[in-house]
Image (cartoon, rainbow, N blue to C red):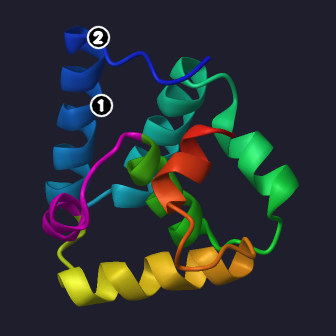
Amino acid sequence: MLFDDGPDNQKELGKMLRLLNTNDKTQDMWKEFETRFDELNDGFTGKLVALHPDLTPAEIRMCAMLRLQLTSKEISELTNRSTRTIETIRSNIRKKMCLNSCNNLTAYILGI
C-alpha cells in the first residue's frame, strides 16, 4: 500500500514534520513520526532497511520524506539544511542504492 495521501493524513504528517523542526525532543518525535509513517505505508522503513542495510538513520528519514513526495526545497526548509546539502544526501542515497542519475530516486522509493 502506498502512502494514503488523503487530506487528513497529509495534514497530520505535515504537522509532525513541522514539530520536528521546532521541538527540542526531535529524536523522540522522529521515532513517533517513523512509527506513524510505517503504519500508513505498510512497513516502508523495514522494507527499505532490508533492501539497503547500509543507509544511515538520516538517509532513512530522507527516504521517508521523499516517499511523501516532498521537494528538495521543502525538505531543506523542514530540516534547516541547504538545498545543496539535500541534493548531496540524495546523491549519496542513489549511490548506496546503485541507482544512476538517470533513475528517479523518488519513483524508486515509491515502488518499495
What is the secondary structure assignment of the residue under circle 1? helix
- Amino acid bearing label 2: Gly
The answer for how far apart the CA atoms under marks 1 and 2 are is 11 Å
- Of tags 1 and 2, the one toward the viewer is 2
- Amino acid bearing label 1: Leu
Residue 59 rendering spot, x and y as whole percentages: 55, 69
Q: Residue at x 52, y 61 (%)?
A: 105
Q: Which residue is mark 2?
A: 6
Residue 81 rendering spot, x and y as whole percentages: 22, 81
Q: Which residue is mark 1?
A: 13
Q: Earlier in the sequence, mark 1 or mark 2?
A: 2
Q: Residue at x 70, y 71 (%)?
A: 55
Q: Residues within 10 Å of mark 2 (few under 14, many from 20)?
A: few
What secondary structure do most residues of the magenta stretch adopt? Answer: helix
**Image-based side of 32 in relation to 100, left or right:** left
Q: Is residue 78 above or below residue 58?
A: above
Q: Quadrant of residue 13?
A: top left
**Image-based side of 64 in relation to 78, left or right:** right
Residue 3 rendering spot, x and y as whole percentages: 47, 24
- Range drawn in magenta: 68-78
Q: Residues within 10 Å of mark 1 (few under 14, many from 20)?
A: some
**Image-based side of 1 in relation to 58, left or right:** right
Quadrant of the frame with the N terminus = top right
Residue 40 rendering spot, x and y as whole percentages: 52, 19
